[in-house]
Amino acid sequence: MSLKLGFWSDKEYHLDRMDLSGLTEAYFQYYAIAAYILVALAAGAAAFYGLATGQAALLPTLFSMLATFFIYPIVWYLLHRYILHSRWMWKSKLTAGTWKRIHYDHHSDPNNLKVLFGALYTTLPTVALASMPVGYLLAGWVGALAALATGVVQTCIYEYFHCIQHLGYQPKWAWVREIKKFHMAHHFHNENGNYGITNLWWDKVLGTLYEGAGARPRSPTVFNLGYDEEVAKTYPYVAKMTPNWPYNTNPVSRKREEAAAREASAAQPS
């Protein structure tokens, strides 16, 4: 599920062939990012109005924002580890399409910007559920809106740095180099670890952080998350929604095969 608007209507964006300025241009024109920014502005303005009119105290409202700031990394760690890397979502026709959109497509084509962004219809409700109840408990509806605004801003930052990790360049900022190294290992070596995207704290605490190729064996399911032709015989829903199925799930090998097929087709006499 995605909308095709303007800048994004007829283009493919592959981060290994983009620079930072190209990414930034595409990022701010993606419909989900635009929606997050609008939600953050609206929720923030409403929360400010509530504070200005005395409907909530400043300190509890600030605590609701601070609580969201600390809750966000553990919520996304748990979602990434236990939902996005689950092996139950492909088993139901009701959830297979969502799982394919939110993670299978990303792992089978990690540098494709169109499937890197989280889906708006899954991400925004998740942020709201993770932030607003705590904000409400601390400062009523004003705290709930302040927490939502905080969570959505964090999502925008998370998405931007996630994109940077997939760019084909070496970041100058040491922290970005570090999170890129661990995230690339998650995508191209072994998916069963390094679940944090911008925050590695919970990987360290829960024992899922690993340095790279020398720390763990290469996973045979790093690109398909375990959904292969044998699984598809029993649970065909993702396969039916995937063009050119079955295909080589290794994105590097797949692109080479596709290029070779194009060259062979062009060399055929007309």
Image (cartoon, rainbow, N blue to C red):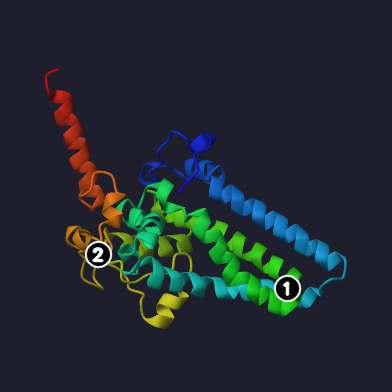
**In the image, what residue occupies the spot 34% across and 53% down?**
105
**In the image, what residue occupies the spot 67% across and 71% down?**
65
User: In the rendered view, does 270 fall on the left or right side of 76?
Assistant: left
User: In the rendered view, does 135 fall on the left or right side of 203?
Assistant: right
Residue that extends furthest to the right in the rendered view of this protein: 53
Q: Nearer the viewer, residue 192 or 235?
A: 235
Residue type, mark 1 in image: Leu
**In the image, what residue occupies the spot 82% across and 68% down?**
51
Residue 124: quarter of image: bottom right
Q: Nearer the viewer, residue 55 or 151?
A: 55
Instruction: Say if mark 2 contacts mark 1, CB within 8 Å.
Output: no
Q: How many marks?
A: 2
Is disc 1 placed on a helix, strand or loop? helix
The answer to whether residue 172 is seen in the rendering is no
Q: Does 146 sit above or below residue 139?
A: above
Q: Position of residue 208 (x, y in %)?
A: 35, 77
Q: Which quadrant, please, contains the C terminus?
A: top left
Provide the residue designation for mark 2.
Answer: 226
The answer to whether residue 20 is seen in the rendering is yes
Residue that extends furthest to the left in the rendered view of this protein: 269
How many residues crowd around disc 2 within 10 Å: few (fewer than 14), some, or many (20 or more)? Answer: some
Residue type, mark 2 in image: Gly
Q: Which mark is residue 62?
A: 1
Q: Position of residue 196 (x, y in %)?
A: 43, 69
Residue that extends furthest to the front in the rendered view of this protein: 93
How many residues crowd around disc 1 within 10 Å: few (fewer than 14), some, or many (20 or more)? Answer: some
**Closer to us: mark 2 or mark 1?**
2
Q: Position of residue 113 (x, y in %)?
A: 42, 47
- Label 2, label 1: how many angstroms apart (C-alpha)? 43 Å
